[in-house]
Image (spheres, rainbow, N blue to C red):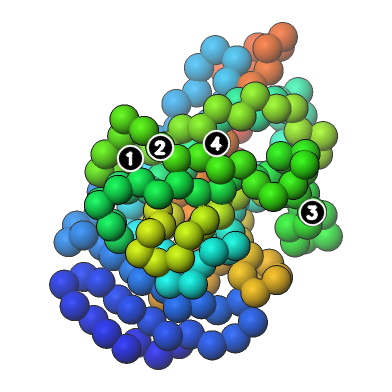
Amino acid sequence: MRVVALFWGVIAVAAAGVQAADVAVDGDAYPTVASDPVNKDASLELSWDNGTRQWNIAWYTGTGAWVGNEFDLGTISTYRAIRKIKFYSRSNWPNAQWDGFHLGVFNFSGGIPGSMLWPTGGGGYFFKPTGLSGHVWVEINIGWTCPAVTFVAAEGQYYNWPNCDPFAVDTNANFSGHSWEYYGGSWSPLSTAADPYRNLMLRVIVDDETLAVAPASLGRVKALYR
């Protein structure tokens, strides 16, 4: 990768390769504190980020590109209903409005994301936030039972720069190994101009409407995804 511009916390990078893309990265001067997962009742919020934003990232030519996190429900197999996807973004960069993005859930087998499971018709689910501004978690109701134990919950950039909504990575420079990107027709571990910050701030809330989680089990789940 070659840095072509650096100004007021914004990095513009020209990158080459099958999955590489020109991206813009903005830190907005200081990290933004987001939140820790909140687990209550029959719901669990699963995450790989530490709750604090380091960078926002958007592709210049990102239409059709995806970023996502892999989750494994193998130890909590009764939690199969994906109630919500939470995606950390912002309304005031790179332009001054929400433009909308795609959401999708992909199969994960053989160590790499595969075909789209949800929406069942394919193509992705378009969502444009309303009533939110600034740096925020955007919560999108899904209400769908996942047929797979392991999956990738993902966000797709819908428009090219600057008419797009950015994704975010946290302040942990140690890569969890669970964040992915889809660009140029293939999936690969997330890697952008923001490296070594590569942990995507995208979470899922899963639900078990019939079985409660014992406190000991809840602690194990939180440890697994943090």
Along the horizontal axis of the image, is 74 left or right of 41? right
Q: CA distance from mark 4 to mark 3?
A: 18 Å
Callout 3 secondary element: strand
Q: Amino acid at mark 1?
A: Val
Q: Residue at x 45, y 78 (%)?
A: 22
Callout 2 secondary element: loop
Of the two numbered discs 1 and 3 on the same chain, state the one appearing first in sequence.
3
Residue 19 seen in render: yes
Q: Dot 3 corresponds to which residue?
A: 115
Q: Dot 4 corresponds to which residue?
A: 85
Q: CA distance from mark 2 to mark 4?
A: 13 Å
Q: Dot 1 corresponds to which residue?
A: 136
Q: Amino acid at mark 4?
A: Ile
Callout 1 secondary element: strand
In the rendered structure, find residue 15 and report the number of the disc placed on it. none
Of the two numbered discs 4 and 1 on the same chain, state the one appearing first in sequence.
4
Relative image position of residue 187 (x, y in whole percent)? 68, 67
Residue 173 seen in render: no
Q: CA distance from mark 1 to mark 2?
A: 10 Å
Marks 1 and 2 in Cβ contact (< 8 Å): yes
Marks 2 and 4 in Cβ contact (< 8 Å): no
